[in-house]
Image: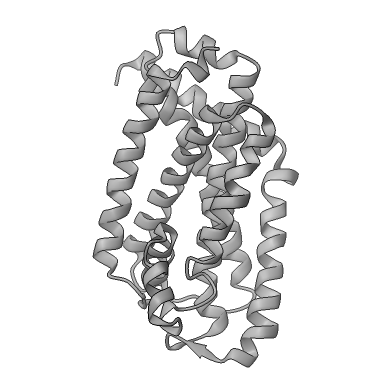
Amino acid sequence: MSRQVFIAFATLVRKEVRRFMRIWVQTLIPPAITMTLYFLIFGSLIGSRIGQMGGYDYMSFVIPGLIMMAVINNAYSNVASSFFSAKFNKSIEELLVSPTPNAVILLGYVCGGALRGLLVGVIVTLLSLFFTSLPIHSPLMVILVVVLSAVLFAMAGLVNAIFANSFDDISVVPTFVLTPLTYLGGVFYSIDLLPEFWRSVSQLNPILYLVNAFRYGMLGVSDVHVGWALGGVVVLVAVLFCVCLYMMEKSRRLRQ
């Protein structure tokens, strides 16, 4: 990477980080409050009556899923809103006609979104320590899964931003696709509790594999084969990167 390209990349990342840090009351505090309410309701109040799940108390079982949910939602929403804003006010056109390679523009936005998701994940993890102690079964697995997940959904947010025609379109996918998949992705329960038919349906949900791979990294338990889950995430990241790059180079929605 040449010095000019690195400067362009670092500038984009710094711009994205400063953007969400400047309004940290809106970007970092709300997910922290939401996750704390989840800890109180599902962990302390309901969890004490449920008992153990997967060999751990219910609070410990749901916390990895809640951390992953926070990372996914914030990485996605950061890129979706930021990139669409640049598209809406036409500033993205200046980037596209500049000497900056499209791959660098893509990586800059994705890294900025992923950093927000990871920062929120760290905040939620620290808050969870007030409710229970978290063992770390495999630190490498934890880091790999959370970073790949943040990058994957940051790129998904960029796809949403490219297709969106208005700010209302930014909320459609999180509301009607991302949220249902997350809630049905094994965050609050083990799919072993489901009937055979619904267990098979759940296995079509990609978020199920992310949540379980992350839970395995923390607790050492999983409802799916962890190797296949990690390999699938790597493949999805590679495919979505190529899709995003193609759309940035060819999509007429960026050049209207």
Residue pushed farthest right? 25
- Among the 4 quarters of the image, the one containing residue 27: top right
Quarter of the image where the C terminus is located: top right
Residue drawn at (65%, 16%) of the image: 89
Give the residue at x 75% y 45%. 25
Q: Is residue 93 above or below residue 55?
A: above
Left or right, 97 with reference to 140? right
Residue 131, quarter of picture: bottom right
Q: Is residue 60 above or below residue 9?
A: below
Left or right? Give the position of 39 relative to 247: right
Q: Give the percent coordinates (x, y) of residue 5.
A: 37, 17
Residue shown at 37% from the left, 16% from the top: 101
Which percent across, then down, holds residue 248?
A: 42, 22
User: Where is residue 251 drawn, in percent x and y?
Assistant: 44, 20
Q: Is residue 219 visible?
A: no
Residue 82 appears left or right of 150: right
Q: Is residue 150 above or below residue 42?
A: above
Total labels drawn: 0
Q: Quadrant of the N terminus?
A: top left
The spot of residue 209 in percent (x, y) is: 37, 63
**Residue depicted at x 34% and y 43%:** 237
